[in-house]
């Protein structure tokens, strides 16, 4: 059986994270929207005040070499009703050939533990409505899919236009 570990991303991991992000974009059929670069990731993850954080999941082969098998990218938000911070999972991705080994669950547990250790009142994320395997997985680990909430978003031209 292969060994598995999760660790916080390091600056030198940004190319690996970018490859995983591209894999996620391909899976979600959103490759045209993926404009991430190593430089943008370095600035977001490793500046003096990071915008977000990332962990990488690794499988160790028989020679002890680390094979990246997944990642999560998250940040801290805030709940006015709880008057406490929350951990928001922006993205979770396990490379397709490594699925079914429990790695996604272990990444989620790692993040849940992080949320508890940081005093968070919530651990939240979004899921695409067509991604039934992910929805089933999240429900299996105890998450509630919120039926009465919808994500609203402004980007690009509409954001700039509205900001005037």
Image: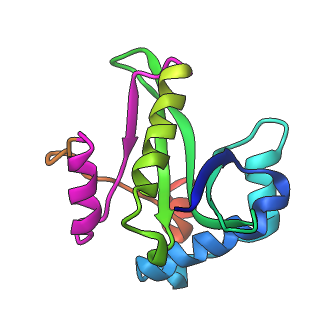
Relative to 95, is 3 above or below?
Answer: above
What residue is rendered at 45% in x and 59% in y?
Answer: 154
**Seen in the image, is 64 located left or right of residue 97?**
right
Relative to 160, is 147 above or below?
Answer: above
**Seen in the image, is 92 located left or right of residue 75?**
left
The verdict on residue 140 being magenta is yes
Protein image colouring:
rainbow
Relative to 12, is 119 above or below?
Answer: above
Q: How many marks?
A: 0
28 and 134: which is toward the camera: 134
The verdict on residue 157 being magenta is no
What residue is rendered at 48% in x and 71% in y?
Answer: 98
The picture quadrant where one finds residue 39 is bottom right
What residue is rendered at 48% in x and 66% in y?
Answer: 94
What residue is rendered at 78% in x and 60% in y?
Answer: 13
Where residue 63 appears, as percent x and y from the top left, is 75, 68
Where residue 18 appears, as percent x and y from the top left, is 68, 70
In the rendered image, the residue lying farthest to the left is 147
Where residue 158 appears, as percent x and y from the top left, is 48, 66
* Quadrant of the rendering where the C terminus is positioned: bottom right
In magenta, the rendered stretch is 118-143
**Seen in the image, is 86 located left or right of residue 148?**
right
The picture quadrant where one finds residue 141 is top left
Where residue 81 appears, as percent x and y from the top left, is 33, 18
């Amino acid at each position: 059986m292969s060994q598995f570990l999760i660790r916080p991303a390091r600056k030198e991991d940004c190319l690996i994270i970018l490859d995983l992000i591209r894999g996620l974009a391909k899976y979600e059929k959103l490759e045209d929207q993926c404009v991430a670069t190593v430089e943008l990731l370095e600035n977001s993850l490793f500046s003096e005040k990071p915008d977000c954080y990332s962990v990488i999941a690794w499988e160790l082969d028989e020679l002890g070499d680390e094979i990246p098998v997944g990642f999560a990218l998250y940040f801290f938000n805030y709940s006015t009703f709880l008057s406490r911070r929350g951990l928001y999972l922006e993205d979770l991705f396990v490379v397709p050939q490594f699925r079914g080994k429990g790695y996604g669950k272990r990444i989620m547990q790692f993040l849940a533990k992080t949320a508890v250790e940081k005093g968070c009142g919530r651990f939240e994320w979004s899921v695409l409505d067509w991604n039934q395997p992910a929805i089933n997985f999240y429900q299996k680990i105890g998450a509630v899919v919120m039926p009465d909430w919808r994500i609203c978003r402004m980007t690009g031209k509409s954001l700039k236009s509205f900001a005037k």
